[in-house]
Amino acid sequence: MSEKTHERHEQISRRGFLRTGAAGLGAALVSGRLSRSLSGAEDAARKASPPTETRVLGRTNLNVTVIGFGTYGFSNPGVLQKAIESGINLIETDRTYGNGQAEKAIGEVVKKLQRDKVIVGTGWGVSPGVTKSQLLESLDASLKRLQTDYVDLLRAFMVDDPKVLEISEQFEAFEAAKKAGKARFYGVSSHGGNQLDVFNAAADSGKFDFVMGRYNFMEQANGEAFVKKLAEKKIGFIGFKTQAGNRQREVEELQKSGLSVRAAAAKWALQNPSVTSILGAIHSFEDIEEYLQTAREKLTADEQRLLQRYAEIFDSEYCRNCGTCQSHCPFGVAIADVMRYCMYFKYYDTQAEARRLYAELPPQARPVVCHTCPGHCVAHCPHGLRVRQNLQEAERLLG
Amino acid sequence: MLKSGNKCQWVLLLAFLLAGVCGCRPVLPPSQTVVGWDYSELPTAYDPETLYHYINGKARVYLDYGFVRLDHAQFASPDGKAVIDVDVYDVGAPEGAFGIYSLERGEELPLHYKRRLGYMNGPARFFWKGRHYVTITSPASSAETIQAIHSLSSYVENSIPGESGGLPILAAFPEENKVPESEQYFATDFLGYEFMGAGFTASYIELGGRFKLFLSPKDSPAQARQAFEKLRQALSKGGQLLGEEQGIGQAAFLAQDDYLGNWLVSLNDAYVVGSVGFQDLPAASSALLRLCRNLSP
């Protein structure tokens, strides 16, 4: 570009720009489109596609679409707006995503919508020592970024210790927020190694309206049990991590059959009517249609076989039985045996047999001491597996 | 023949040189880097296949940015009441490291901001250097923990080869009216379109709001033209083309859609560039012209 041309544009006025622009721009201005488009999201819900299936989120009685909009790594309000137009009504985020950027991007869309057409959820951080006022300040900051007066779903974000659910300040803060009209329902999210314990504690406490956690075909036995328990107590469940890993090499190989592992995994999760919704990683306009198409279809026998095959590959790769961890365990835990029995329990519908085998192990070979160890097994695993965490899970399931 | 002591020195020197040449892995702080702080989780490595075990669903995004390897360790305070997680992500290239850093940082400047390369946010330090993105975080916020975070951070930063520095391409974004340090890099689905691949954005202040300048580098002018035309088609289908614009790059058009508002898109050699989300057309076009000028050889 020449300097002269540049200068011309530097000096251009709004009127000048319009004059040098194409005729289409003038036509657009006449029709009022330019100004309208700048608040174009305001009627997004009105233009919604044929309705996407909804389910009731436990005792909240909220009708939530089976596909929710997950927002880690999200920054494009346009994609969210399109998703809402396409029928998705659940938006889940947290104040930590992009240091609040995800909430801000959501706010750009939410402020233009009829607020009760979407269900917005966010989280606050609950940890020992947190005060009621700190939590309320966190919520106020989220509401400001979200450009809304309230969130429908407020949750303790990523809890990995059931004791966190006993912290009374969170309930005091939630009640205050609810009274002020800033939050409607309270829940908890977790996806760490202690998820099962956290959700059991949440169900037993009676103080949570919904929970969010990982739910996938690789953890069928665990998942179905806790989702059933939650449903019995009318606690809504929203699932994520439905893909059970990012094993791209295996996925590419399996998908040569023309089936999609992502779609099959999502359909598998939605087979369970107690799973109200799953959160999709929706980053592009193309992702929206893929997820919605998935929600409209049932899991086929071929897809079921695809997932089984994936699980088999995953399992064999999950622990290659190389024995490296075993040789570094200072306590003599029978790592390979314990991991294998745990696999029987979780994936092979032979839970009684798994427990029997585990019970036959000498006491010192069981992973009861793992919580006191910094994880020599993990540090030496050539495949980066969280061996200690898996052993602790095994002790919980089988012990 | 070399004496054994000399041999050792040569071996160490060779290892040091090789590490420098290869670019190599930073070293996690050893136990007791901060006196009294011992490992509560020993150094552990994760690769693209196993990253999911550590960061769950976020792994997909990290893989998009080119994740290669994560080195992790956790330290516990002398009384065992506080822990600090040290995570060093090798993202393969500076763009990837900056991309994840900028994605997780967001646009607003956190407290204790320190140039483009890092910041503290509560009891957590985040920075990138070369191809590495580093997070050093704790749920505890005592003064001792913060001090330990700084010490561990310095250790890791010094162990990463090379100099700290920004990405040269970011200098193309004009400074005038730019929201400080608002640059971001997206590895995929740029602006919501898969075909756009990767790109950079920066935010600008205009009367009554903000808009973004964007920049998507391609391998060749031909590829840039292909992406430019696809974007024109997509905006035509999902919005409305308002016309061609002369004098900005090799070609330019103005468009609108209901999602990001007004677009001014230009083809500039091997780049697709543009302004999006603006209300003030002259301000947006002026900023875009400066961007184009800065990209000129």
Image (spheres, rainbow, N blue to C red):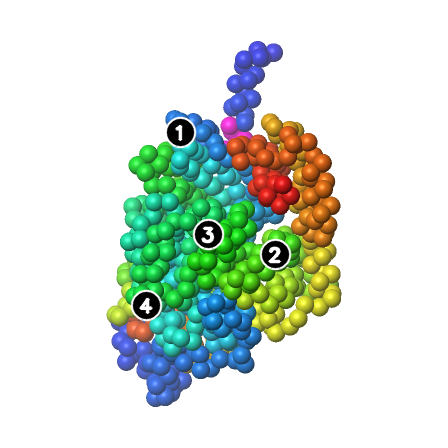
Q: Looking at the image, do the residues carrying marks 1 and 2 touch, with CB atoms under 8 Å apart?
A: no
Q: Which residues are magenta?
A: B16-20
Q: Which residue is mark 4?
A: A181
Placement of B64 over or under B266, stated as above or below: above
Q: Under tag 4, what secondary structure?
A: loop
Q: Is B263 in front, or is A56?
A: A56
The residue type indicated by label 4 comes to Gly
Residue located at (47% from left, 71% from top): A61
Tell me the SS state at disc 3. loop
Residue B78: mark? 1
Based on the displayed image, in which of its 4 quarters is residue A115 positioned?
Answer: bottom left
Q: Position of residue A277 (x, y in %)?
A: 54, 66
Mark 4 vs 3, N-terminal side: 3
> Mark 2 or mark 4, which is nearer the start of the sequence?
4
Residues at discs 4 and 1 both on one chain? no
Label 1 to label 3: alpha-carbon separation? 26 Å
Instruction: Report which residue position mark 3 lands on.
Output: A158
Residue shown at the point (50%, 67%) measured from the top left: A58
